Amino acid sequence: CRKRKKKETAYFNEIRPLVEERINNKLDQFWNEGIDGSDFFISAIGPALEVFGRYERVETYAGEEVKANDFLEFVRKTVSDYTLSKILKNGHLGGIDAETRFYILWRWTYNGAKVIFDDARKLANAAGIELGEFWNNGFVKKDKEYIKVLGPKERGTKFLEKWQFENMVDILHACLILWEKNQRQKITVLLTDTGQLSNNAFWQVAQAISEVLPPGDKEKQMLQGFLYGRKSYQKVANGVNNGEQLTFLSQT
């Protein structure tokens, strides 16, 4: 900590590029040093405050003060975008829905752990979702003051019944459940119906989740098996399966 030598006011839009540059430079260093998980998010706060703390007051152009909490939300969002870019190997984030971004970040940060609600909420906000809209109605489960993100085995098969999916994670989990049941043709139908069969972003997400999970993890094993069959699903969709032409009807 250094004592501020002069009283200055800055506009957030003007110092924002400096903050982002400072964060990204330090995150490159921390990433290369192997810092990960929740420690990685915390590591960005100090470098960001080096810029923010130079000024007695930071405002928007409308004259509203940027509070510390607002600034920390911005820092978390910047770190989440950086982390996702690294995990996805510089993949384009625009084609990946917010729920799936959150799922990837959760698996990288906490894996299968139960996390106190406020920490979970902060990660969700950084990914662009409101956590309260998702628990107990998908892959997010609330248990008293704790939040847990469910894998495909924990979710069961009930969500498959409607054959309507809200995000990439729902589709991926459905594929993994079908893969474990050896229902390869249904996987092809599902991927075709949802437009994911030839969507590189979907396969990139599946690969990224597989890579961040630890060795021996059941979801990791399911993902690896599912990914191994990618070419076979595409062949079946093209009507090539032991030389027979196949016709698919969407399941309703």
Image: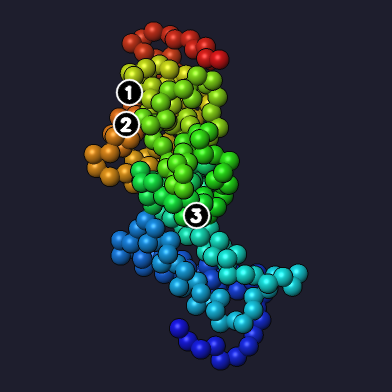
User: Which residue is painted at 51% across and 74% down in the image?
Assistant: 49
Residue 85 in view (yes/no): no
Report the residue that reaches farthest toward the top. Answer: 244
Q: Residues within 10 Å of mark 1 (few under 14, many from 20)?
A: few
Q: Is tag 3's residue or tag 2's residue first in the polypeptide sequence?
A: 3
Camera-nearest residue between 158 and 84: 158
Q: Secondary structure at mark 2?
A: helix
Q: Residue furthest left?
A: 216
Mark 1 lies on a secondary structure that is helix
> Is 50 or 110 nearer to us in this picture?
110
Residue under the image location 46 percent in, 44 percent down: 144
Q: Label 1 is placed on what type of residue?
A: Glu
Residue identifier under label 3: 118
Q: Which residue is mark 2?
A: 222
Which residue bears the numbered disc 1? 180
Quadrant holding the C terminus:
top right
Between 207 and 148, the one nearer to me in the picture: 148
Residue at 50 percent of width and 19 percent of height: 161
Amino acid carrying label 3: it is: Asp
